[in-house]
Image: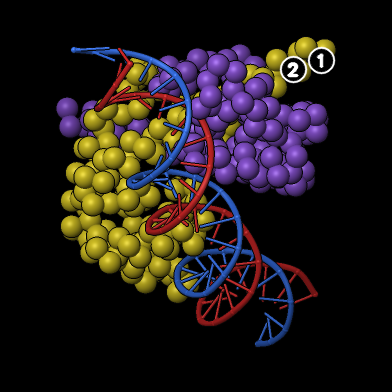
Chain colours: A yellow, B purple, C blue, D red
Amino acid sequence: MTDVRETQSQADRELCGLINGLAKQIEAHVRSRAATLGLTASQGVALRELTGPMTLRELAERMSCEPSNATFVADRLEEQGYLERHPHPGNRRAKQLVLTPAGAELRERLLGLLSEDSPLAPLAPEEQDTLQRLLARAVVR
Amino acid sequence: MTDVRETQSQADRELCGLINGLAKQIEAHVRSRAATLGLTASQGVALRELTGPMTLRELAERMSCEPSNATFVADRLEEQGYLERHPHPGNRRAKQLVLTPAGAELRERLLGLLSEDSPLAPLAPEEQDTLQRLLARAVVR
DNA sequence: CTCGAATGATTGCAATTAGAACCGTTCTAG
DNA sequence: CTAGAACGGTTCTAATTGCAATCATTCGAG
């Protein structure tokens, strides 16, 4: 029984390493593409996740980071004229992050760059589906 | 055809978010368990990956981080008496990282803690196998 | 109502991390 | 042999990140 637990523990460890490795690989990919647009890696991630107007907390969740960090990134994007903080309709605490036209255009360019040589390209579409399904079950929503 | 590319781009983005999210979740899990042993998250990852004597560069690769960071973590573990830098047999540049008895014992305790409530637990063993196979194909070795 | 808890965002600070520069060692083309 | 490139590790610095504290707003039990 110890053997079983040992191999289970080992498989778990290897899986953790693979997930972490792939995450870092994706981050490096985003970093290199974002750099060509004058953006940092986390700015790139933020832009990628800004699929529409959203609150700062929602952006932080999508980026899997702390709200304070999302504030920092939003500051940068706002300084560069890609993002605006609008008052949130119906909640005076919250702010609605909205891309400017320049920001929306930049986002399209970034998405184009990101789709080239994606780290996920080695996987066939149906494999990506399988991956998505498995990950979605593991990730706490 | 634009629609196809759009949905593909969207699927890619969601997948990236899931992978990043799971990686952060695993890191948080390691952080909480390592903290109970007086270790930081990266010290925990290092201890988890130190399956045997290895070079600093190899540890850095396993941790998916820069060698400079691995040096930093190894310093900490060495200060705490869990690790030693031995001269590498056959390569005077390299150093062999070796766990002390205390380090080996701590590692066993950590692995025990990590196996409890693993973020990967929601997946059945065969699903974990599938996941491992898919990730291994995507991760650059 | 209303008061305490919870939420959304921001700030300041500490810790972690990556990146470049550097030194000693090893490899390799000529 | 012997330069010059490459490798392994360390150091220094700057940037990124998480965490705790704070403020304003909103929610909810009684």
| Mark seen at residue A6 | 2
Work out whether residue A53 can be spotted: yes
Residue B26 in the image: state x and y as whole percent. 60, 37
Image quadrant where residue A122 sits: top left
Residue B69 in the image: state x and y as whole percent. 52, 42
Label 1: which residue?
Answer: A2
Q: Amino acid at mark 2?
A: Glu
Residue contact between numbered discs 2 and 1, judged by CB atoms under 8 Å: yes
- Eyeballing the image, is A140 above or below A67? above
**Residues beneath discs 2 and 1 located on the same chain:** yes
| Mark seen at residue B17 | none
Locate the C terminus of chain B and report the quarter of the image it occupies: top left
Label 1 resides on the chain identified as: A
Locate the N terminus of chain B and report the quarter of the image it occupies: top left
Foreground pick, C1 / A89: A89
Foreground pick, D13 / A6: D13
Q: Secondary structure at mark 2?
A: helix
- The residue sitting at 57% across, 44% down in the picture is B72
- The residue sitting at 26% across, 40% down in the picture is A33
- Eyeballing the image, is C10 above or below A73? below
Q: Amino acid at mark 1?
A: Thr
Residue A64 in the image: state x and y as whole percent. 49, 47
